[in-house]
Image (cartoon, helix red, strand yellow):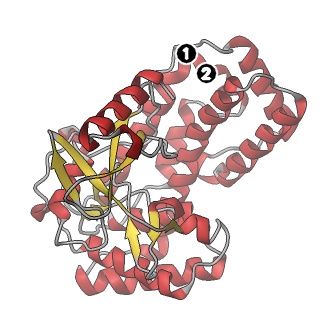
């Protein structure tokens, strides 16, 4: 956590609340330094936050402001955080409850009462078409393919991974990538693998629907938080990302695909066109994307530790081998390096680019 970012976020929380003793936090979170405060004259609690400085972004962002998006969605999508403006700051309501991941860990089934609400939520998302969502965007014009152009949509995601995650960090990670069999040819093979998507009408996507972004309140109602990565695009991509991140048991993963199709077709006919083939391809893209992001994250996590021993290297090597094996087909890897070879590559990277490296550009 950068001290400067933390101090700014806390100062804002104290300023808005008027009482430093009621400020709670910081909360756990990747993208923001967040504090929770009560506000006089309102019910519940509110989040005051600031983006973390020097943060690596591994996903393309579409909207200029999460708070602007949530304001625009008020009354259209239920069970999302309210927004209030106080003293020039836009605050999100803090949703009281437990994350779905706290209640039901990754790999475990989700109870029916929550499962049904997730499927219903997808229908609510698909009901928000691009023509009705008038919110300022940060993404460039070339990152906004025409409605229905699913191939163009996926190409822009591949470009982001190639250019912003891979190419812009070659100065630091080229040797490590190469030792794992990853180079510019990986993206040519990936594009060939995921080509030929069917047309589907675009809609709003949350694009980050995992267990920690669902809150279950005391009445078992499901709330959706952290809209930072929301975008407009292929609705099937939202399902693919959800299945990849949720780690449902196989039987429940299939059940979600069935219920998703029923929910979105009821609202926007054609939203599930070609999903029998395309869903697997989109999940393969997510697997391939994770290779490049996780190689960087694992290396940086090692670099942050005071002592990198053989056991820790072995754990990191095992983690990356599983990720590489899952993406071997879409990346066209002829073989997946073993745990020892990956651990050796990580140690070499650590020795060459140890603590104090400032060459990251994400």
Judge whether 156 appears above or below 216 on screen. above
Q: Is residue 290 above or below residue 270?
A: above
Instruction: Kindly identify the residue that appears in the image at 26 percent across and 58 percent down.
Output: 149
Q: How many marks?
A: 2
* Tag 1 residue: 171
Q: Residues within 10 Å of mark 1 (few under 14, many from 20)?
A: few
User: Would you call the spot at circle 2 few (<14 residues within 10 Å), some (14-19), or many (20 or more)?
Assistant: some
Q: Nearer the viewer, residue 341 or 108?
A: 108
Question: Which image quadrant: the C terminus?
Answer: top left
Q: From the viewer's perspective, tell me whether residue 223 is left or right of residue 105.
A: left
Gap in Å between the C-alphas at discs 2 and 1? 6 Å
Query: Does any portion of residue 81 appear in the rendered image?
Result: yes
Mark 1 secondary-structure assignment:
helix
Looking at the image, can residue 278 be seen? no
Which of the 4 image quarters holds residue 361?
top left
* Residue topped by disc 2: 174
CB atoms at circles 2 and 1 under 8 Å apart? yes
Which residue is rendered at x = 52% and y = 53% of the image? 286
């Amino acid at each position: 956590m950068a001290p400067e970012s933390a101090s700014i976020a806390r100062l804002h929380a104290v300023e808005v609340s008027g009482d430093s003793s009621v400020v709670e936090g910081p909360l756990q979170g990747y993208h923001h330094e967040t504090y929770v405060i009560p506000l006089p004259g309102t019910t519940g609690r509110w989040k005051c936050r600031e983006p973390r400085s020097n943060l690596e972004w591994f996903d393309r962002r579409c909207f200029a402001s999460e708070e602007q998006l949530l304001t625009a969605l008020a009354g259209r999508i239920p069970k999302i955080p309210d927004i209030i403006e106080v003293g020039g700051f836009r605050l999100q309501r803090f949703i009281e409850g437990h994350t779905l991941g706290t209640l039901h860990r990754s790999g475990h089934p989700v109870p029916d009462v929550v499962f049904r609400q997730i499927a219903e939520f997808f229908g609510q998302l698909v009901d928000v078409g691009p023509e009705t969502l008038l919110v300022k965007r940060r993404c460039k014009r070339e990152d906004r393919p025409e409605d229905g152009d699913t191939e163009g949509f996926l190409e822009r995601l591949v470009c982001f991974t190639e250019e912003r995650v891979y190419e812009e960090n070659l100065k630091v990670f080229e040797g490590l990538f190469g030792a794992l069999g990853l180079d510019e040819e990986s993206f040519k093979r990936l594009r060939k693998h995921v080509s030929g998507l069917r047309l589907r009408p675009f809609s709003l996507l949350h694009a980050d629907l995992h267990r920690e972004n669902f809150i279950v309140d005391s009445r078992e109602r499901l709330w959706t938080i952290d809209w930072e990565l929301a975008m407009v695009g292929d609705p099937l991509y939202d399902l693919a990302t959800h299945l990849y991140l949720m780690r449902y048991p196989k039987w429940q993963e299939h059940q979600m695909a069935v219920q998703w199709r029923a929910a979105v077709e009821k609202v926007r006919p054609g939203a599930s066109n070609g999903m029998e083939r395309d869903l697997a391809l989109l999940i393969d893209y997510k697997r391939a994307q994770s290779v490049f992001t996780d190689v960087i994250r694992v290396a940086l996590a090692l670099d942050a530790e005071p002592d990198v021993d053989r056991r820790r290297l072995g754990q990191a090597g095992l983690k990356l081998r599983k990720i590489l094996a899952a993406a071997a087909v879409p990346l066209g890897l002829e073989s997946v390096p073993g745990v020892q070879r990956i651990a050796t590559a990580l140690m070499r990277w650590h020795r060459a680019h140890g603590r104090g490296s400032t060459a990251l550009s994400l």
